[in-house]
Image (spheres, helix red, strand yellow):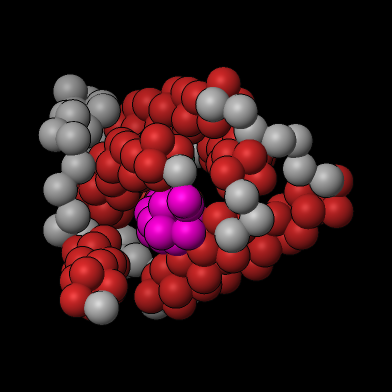
Amino acid sequence: MKSRMDALVNEFDIALKTLSFTKPGTNRETPGKEFKDTLNQKDTKLAQRLMRVNLAGEVAAQALYRGQATASKDPEIRQHLIQAGEEETDHLLWCKERLDELDGRPSIFNSFWYLGSFTLGYAVGKFGEKTSLGFVEETEKQVVKHLNSHIDQISLTDNKTHAILKAMREDEDDHGQAAKAAGADDLKEPTKKLMQLSAKVMTTLSHWL
Ligand SMILES: [Fe+2]
Ligand SMILES: [Fe+2]
């Protein structure tokens, strides 16, 4: 009973640290530090919106991985999920740092994305390890596509944001491949569509709020 309580307290602590952007990452330096900002107002506005979306996505990623790890019964897979989540923490911190530089603000729905994503991750994890890994693989594939669209949209003069998005894209691609190599099942088409739809709701709302 005590250990369950401990786990719950620990999970809550991680959620709070994520939502206050104080969760420690792996200490990799923020990409693009060498560039100076010379953005006009229009490009700054766009970058603020896109980085708010990406920050919301990284909050959700944290919660998905934690939810999936919590549900996982296989210690090795569980560790795999936790480790991937830790690397994702760098993305969370990079996006927050960039958003601060741009004078943007995080999505007002971040707590909601966390709770919803943790629940979803936990539910997916209950379907078993192969499905859970399949979910990671598909999520990361969709994230890579999403990042590509942001890389295309962002102003060519915005070197800092470009550097961050490209570094993230590389990691997401690695995570997807690692999940596949660890034995991911391919998800059914309707499941993939549903994932796209829920991501669309999150990215659309976070764009503005
Ligand atoms: Fe990420
Ligand atoms: Fe990811």
The residue drawn where x is 54% and y is 26% is 182
Q: Which residues are magenta?
A: 54-73
Position of 190 relative to 183 (above/below): below
The residue drawn where x is 42% and y is 28% is 171
Of residues 158 and 109, the one drawn nearer to the viewer in this rendering: 109
Q: Quadrant of the N terminus?
A: bottom left
Position of 103 relative to 28 (above/below): below
Q: Position of residue 10 (x, y in %)?
A: 21, 67
Taking the image as shown, residue 180 lies to the left or right of residue 40, namely right
Can residue 56 be seen from the camera position used here? no
**Toward which corner of the image does residue 165 lie, by quadrant?**
top left
Can residue 30 be seen from the camera position used here? yes
Per the image, is 71 magenta?
A: yes
Q: Position of residue 99 (x, y in %)?
A: 29, 53
Q: Main secondary structure of the magenta part?
A: helix
Of residues 34 and 141, the one drawn nearer to the viewer in this rendering: 141
The residue drawn where x is 44% and y is 74% is 115
Count of numbered labels shown in the rendering: 0
Position of 69 relative to 80 (above/below): below
Taking the image as shown, residue 40 lies to the left or right of residue 204, namely left
The residue drawn where x is 17% and y is 23% is 34
Q: Position of residue 105 (x, y in %)?
A: 31, 66
Per the image, is 69 magenta?
A: yes
Taking the image as shown, residue 26 lies to the left or right of residue 161, namely left
Of residues 117 and 77, the one drawn nearer to the viewer in this rendering: 77
Q: Position of residue 168 (x, y in %)?
A: 41, 32
